[in-house]
Image (cartoon, rainbow, N blue to C red):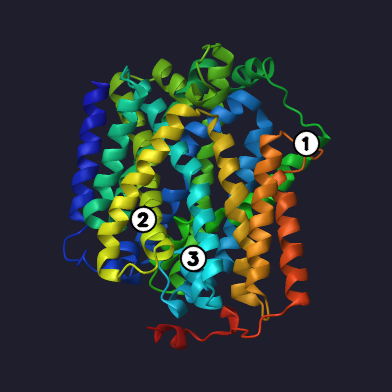
Amino acid sequence: MASFVFLAIIVFSLIVAFAAMRGHNMHDLKEYLVASRQFGGFLLFFLGVGEIYSIGTMIGFPGGIYAKGPTYGIWFLGYILLAYPVGYFINPLIWRAGQLYNAMTLPDLFKGHFNNRALELTVTITAILFMVPWGQLQFTGLIVALHGLGWDLNPLALSLIAAVLAFAYIAASGIRAPAMVSIIKDVLLVLALVVTGIAAAAAGGVSHIFHDAGLHVHNQMNAAQQRFSMSTMFFQALGFYLMPFAIPNIFTARSEQTIRKAQIFMPLYMLMYPFLVVAAYYSLGQSFHLASPNQAFMAAAVALLPHWLLGMVAAGAALSGLVVLAGISLAMGPLITRNLLSHLPESKQRSGAQIAIVAYLALSIIFTLVTPSLMLTLINTAYFGITQFFPGLMAILFMRRINPYAIIAGIMVADILAVGMDVMHVNLDGWNIGFVCLLINAVIVGLGSLVKRSVNSPMPVVYARISTAMRAP
């Protein structure tokens, strides 16, 4: 019964995805990638939260609580909450820059503002490399969700099924498909989290659940853990909207005001997290002896819910991963065909992007199978590289006379240091490695621009008039 309900919902989501193309010219690259910049607040809201509250929320967050205790829960909640006010003020300016430079990708912003091919390539290659862990994150969660249904298939087979579904969503309808499917996904996500959390609380009692969990994890943080939580919250909040798949979502908006309206309501989704904590602590107290902490939420759902409801929960988890995987893939394609291979004519970028998407999905599957990891570790790894774009973005939006080669040096030094220290397990007395590297990055950009300022200093986007931006080719 669970599998039947699950499959019915997935088929329905595919129908919705293909129906999204009706009345739109999907051969137009701008329509395919950013919906001709015409999304209103309703679709922008669901597209935005669809990317934010993904399978990392449903599977990764309880897994982190299960494995590490409340330390991980605090930073996970904190960085998302802190990111919302950052996005409220920054995202409308990113949209304005997109209008000004006719941008459809993150590197397009750097290319349009600085007119520097080396900087465009640096941002493009960094974005591609550090998006692989985010794709791996989705595949890891999808495998957990499908195993929760009792599908005892090889992880390779499950990954291939997920890749085909993600590709099918975007092949015909572009970014409109994730936006429409996100509506279904969000309804199921909220239902799944609330129902499972309530069932866990009813089965064990909230106080009893937390007491049992307290026997397995420490509910207090030492000074080093506090430094890690605070520095990670701040670091990841700055990079939250710099994800290569988040930037095109901003570009789909009809206006700056549309973005602000959508941002206001997004924090309401944080009300789901208490239910996730209860489910994770329930699994911890039950001593399920899970093969991986990532299985904590689905283990609680399997133990507590009837089969038909388990099918809906698994479908919510699967769609959470598939929507984000489709969005990531749709962002990765033009990074390769539009920015990496800049000589490719626009008429061939759509078909070229689809080939690149298949290659990206294949690479993500390989990493998922060869290097399995705790999902929250994958989140941290992705942010090590992505947040290093922040000083460059601030230069585009607010600053003058910033040297593009200083931005290149800052990104490269910070990325190499972050990855190197992470591989060598360097402990900076609890401080997040990426945060320390971001400070180094900012110093390099500042000092490098003082030593040799940009000769052709473009006007910061904050001073650009909207009417001027709208007339950009």
The x and y percentages for residue 428 are 79, 40
**Which one is earlier in the sequence, the residue at label 3 or at label 2?**
3
Q: In front: 244, or 269?
A: 244
Dot 1: element: loop
Q: Residue at image x 81%, y 32%?
A: 222
Q: Where does label 3 land, which residue?
A: 107
Tell me whether the residue at label 2 lies in contact with that at label 1, contact meaning CB atoms closer than 8 angstroms: no
- Amino acid type of the residue that numbered disc 1 sits on in the rendered structure: Asn
The answer to whether any part of residue 132 appears in the image is: yes
Q: Is residue 286 above or below residue 245?
A: above
Secondary structure category for the residue under label 2: helix
Residue 62 got which mark? Answer: none
Q: Is residue 96 above or below residue 419?
A: below
Residue 187 in the image, given as x and y percentages of width and height? 35, 43
Q: Kindly identify the amino acid type of the residue bearing the numbered disc 3.
A: Pro
Left/right placement of residue 34 relative to residue 383 reads: left
Quick one: label 1 or label 3, which is nearer the N terminus?
A: 3
Q: Position of residue 115 (x, y in %)?
A: 52, 77
Residue 411 in percent (x, y) is at 64, 59
Q: Residue at x 19, y 51 (%)?
A: 18
Q: Which residue is mark 2?
A: 333
Question: In the rendered view, would you say 209 is above or below 436?
Answer: above
For the C terminus, give its image quadrant.
bottom left
Amino acid beneath label 2: Gly
At 35% from the left edge and 67% from the top edge, which residue is drawn?
A: 40
Q: Which residue is mark 1?
A: 427
